[in-house]
Image (cartoon, rainbow, N blue to C red):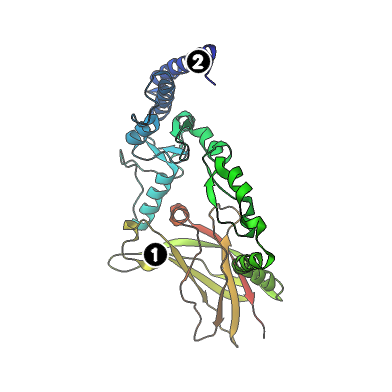
């Protein structure tokens, strides 16, 4: 259905007023705050793309692509930070800059003006975030244009071309396809008519993968029934090695759990020479027993995120038998989701996690 002429004029007038007001605000605030002025200019741009025919086409790459060119990054998120001189950085780039500085033992600086940046010196630019949320962006399924603030909802709930699965996937149907073909497929799907023996073979395969997922949680529930259980908050602090080319490593202060004294150490990319040159970043850690024991101490342990962190860690249980001669584990992976989560940890002043220890008694 074509939009009514009155609605078109109303929308155009609203965008025109928004553009004029935003332009006036940008001029007024330019001297006091260049960051705020940049946000208002982006709002002007957003309004202009809605008014000028052709600016919203794919050939012109949209206002979003223009903004990405100006500030040097793809617009993947709405969070923007700005340095004391008003230069913009998206949240991902900001965290990456802080993590690189930690790895190179340097002060993080703005890539444009080289002023110092940190979580305390930089703040979010809400004007830019608001303007970016109104910029048009292309749906990856139907290729239509939507404001960025509405795009996620459209792709998850409304787009008729979004990829979906058959409702009979629980009995083995592997079909993936556009949402508008779902009804036709489900009406012709052969899986509901399969015999019991055929379905049992499919369900057995699905049960095997499900059992692997449940094995971890069953192991945790089993450990929680042990008599001796301890946990503590641990804080990894950054240090540098004494090598000619120093390397970053982390170590916790000594702490006591299960009446024993322990220390945790961590390293980046298994002590790779130049981890700052790698896009893929990982953390590994080892647990060290510092006190003497009269008998072998068999333990299970795992690290989880602390109560005030938002890093995503998948629980993995490790086992080791500690003795006076073998009092430290090998370095084992800290099971963070990806390199982005690793950068979050590296960008922080300290890494705060929670350690669980379970003593296995014969």
In this rendering, is residue 221 above or below 154? below
- The image quadrant where one finds the N terminus is top right
Residue 149 numbered mark, or none: none
* Image point (57%, 71%), residue name: 317
**Mark 2 element type:** helix
Quadrant in the rendering for residue 266: bottom left
Q: Is 220 left or right of 160, judged from the image as shown?
A: right
In this rendering, is residue 259 above or below 82? below
Residue 258 can be seen in this image: no
Depth check, front residue: 170 or 296: 170
Q: Determine whether label 1 and label 2 are within 8 Å by CB.
A: no
Provide the residue designation for mark 1.
269
**Mark 1 element type:** helix
- Give the image location of residue 7, x and y in percent: 54, 15
- Give the image location of residue 356, x and y in percent: 61, 68
Quadrant in the rendering for residue 361: bottom right
Q: Is 218 left or right of 178, judged from the image as shown?
A: right
Q: From the viewer's perspective, is the residue at label 1 or at label 2 nearer?
A: 2
Depth check, front residue: 53 or 238: 53
* Image point (58%, 47%), residue name: 185
Quadrant in the rendering for residue 39: top left
First in sequence, mark 1 or 2: give its number.
2
Depth check, front residue: 41 or 122: 41
Provide the residue designation for mark 2.
8
Name the residue furthest left.
244
Residue 284 can be seen in this image: yes
Which class describes the residues within 10 Å of circle 1: few (<14), some (14-19), or many (20+)?
some
Which class describes the residues within 10 Å of circle 2: few (<14), some (14-19), or many (20+)?
few
- Give the image location of residue 216, x and y in percent: 61, 69
């Amino acid at each position: 259905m074509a939009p009514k002429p009155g609605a078109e004029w109303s929308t155009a007038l609203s965008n025109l007023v928004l553009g004029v007001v935003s332009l006036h605000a940008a001029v007024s605030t330019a001297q006091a705050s260049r960051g705020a002025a940049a946000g208002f200019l982006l709002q002007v741009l957003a309004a202009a793309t809605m008014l000028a025919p052709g600016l919203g086409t794919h050939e012109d790459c949209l206002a979003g692509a223009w903004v990405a060119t100006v500030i040097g990054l793809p617009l993947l998120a709405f969070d923007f930070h700005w340095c004391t001189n008003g230069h913009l950085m998206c949240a991902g780039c900001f965290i990456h800059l802080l993590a690189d500085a930690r790895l190179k033992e340097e002060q993080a600086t703005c890539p444009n003006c080289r002023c110092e940046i940190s979580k305390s010196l930089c703040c979010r630019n809400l004007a830019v975030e608001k303007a970016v949320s109104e910029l048009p962006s292309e749906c990856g399924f139907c290729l239509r244009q939507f404001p960025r603030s509405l795009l996620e909802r459209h792709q998850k709930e409304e787009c008729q071309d979004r990829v979906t699965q058959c409702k009979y996937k629980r009995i083995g149907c592997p079909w993936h396809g556009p949402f508008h073909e779902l009804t036709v497929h489900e009406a012709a799907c052969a899986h509901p008519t399969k015999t019991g023996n055929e379905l049992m073979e499919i369900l057995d395969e699905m049960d095997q993968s499900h059992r692997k997922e449940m094995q971890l949680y069953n192991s945790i529930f089993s450990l929680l029934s042990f008599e001796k259980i301890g946990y503590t908050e641990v804080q990894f602090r950054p240090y540098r090695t004494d090598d000619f080319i120093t390397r970053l490593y982390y170590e916790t202060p000594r702490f006591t759990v299960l009446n024993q004294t322990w220390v945790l150490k961590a390293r980046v990319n298994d002590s790779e020479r130049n981890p700052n040159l790698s896009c893929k970043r990982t953390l590994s850690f080892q647990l060290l027993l510092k006190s003497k024991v009269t008998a072998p101490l068999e333990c299970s342990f795992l690290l989880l995120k602390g109560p005030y962190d938002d890093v995503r860690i998948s629980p993995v249980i490790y086992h080791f038998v500690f003795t006076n001669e073998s009092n430290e584990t090998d370095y084992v992976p800290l099971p963070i989701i990806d390199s982005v989560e690793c950068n979050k940890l590296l960008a922080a002043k300290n890494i705060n996690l929670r350690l669980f220890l379970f003593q296995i008694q014969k």
